[in-house]
Amino acid sequence: MFNKLKQVKDLRDKAKQLQSKLGEVTVEGSAAWGKVRIEIDGNQSVKKINIDPDMMSDRNKLEDALREAFNDSVKKVQRKMIEVMKQSGDLNIPGLQ
């Protein structure tokens, strides 16, 4: 039983280390030919949003571009997260081996 508790504690410690590493990762998603850019970190927190002034004249296009840029950045950070998790190697998460 103590062995299982130690394994749980070790896994929790590794998860905290991984979360810390992911916090250092930053990616940028873009849309509308780069006129809308969103930067997020590995914990999927938005760090920066850049909008070209030309995009301000059409609210619908801006809303679509923001959504597309956000989705693009999330996809990129998810791929980066998988890379970081694979590099840590010892988490033994099914499907990442």
Image (cartoon, rainbow, N blue to C red):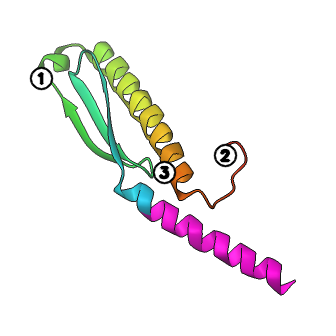
Does residue 6 sit above or below 56 in this rendering? below
Q: Which residues are magenta?
A: 1-20
**Disc 1: which residue:** 53
Q: Position of residue 67 (x, y in %)?
A: 40, 25
Is residue 76 one of those drawn in magenta?
Answer: no
Report which quarter residue 92 is drawn in: bottom right
Question: Which residue is labeled 3 in the image?
Answer: 84
Q: Secondary structure at mark 2?
A: loop
Alpha carbon of mark 2 to alpha carbon of mark 3: how far? 12 Å
Judge the density around disc 2: few (<14), some (14-19), many (≥20) Cα neighbours within 10 Å.
few
Is residue 86 shown left or right of residue 53? right
* Viewer-proximal residue among 88 and 58: 88
Mark whose residue sits in front, 1 or 3: 3
**Residue drawn at (33%, 26%) of the image:** 66
Q: Residue furthest bottom?
A: 2
Residue at the spot x=64%, y=60% of the render?
91
> Which comes sooner in the sequence, label 1 or label 3?
1
Residue tagged by mark 2? 97
Crowding at dot 1, Cα within 10 Å, few <14 / some 14-19 / many 20+, comes out as few
Residue in the picture at 48% in, 51% down: 84
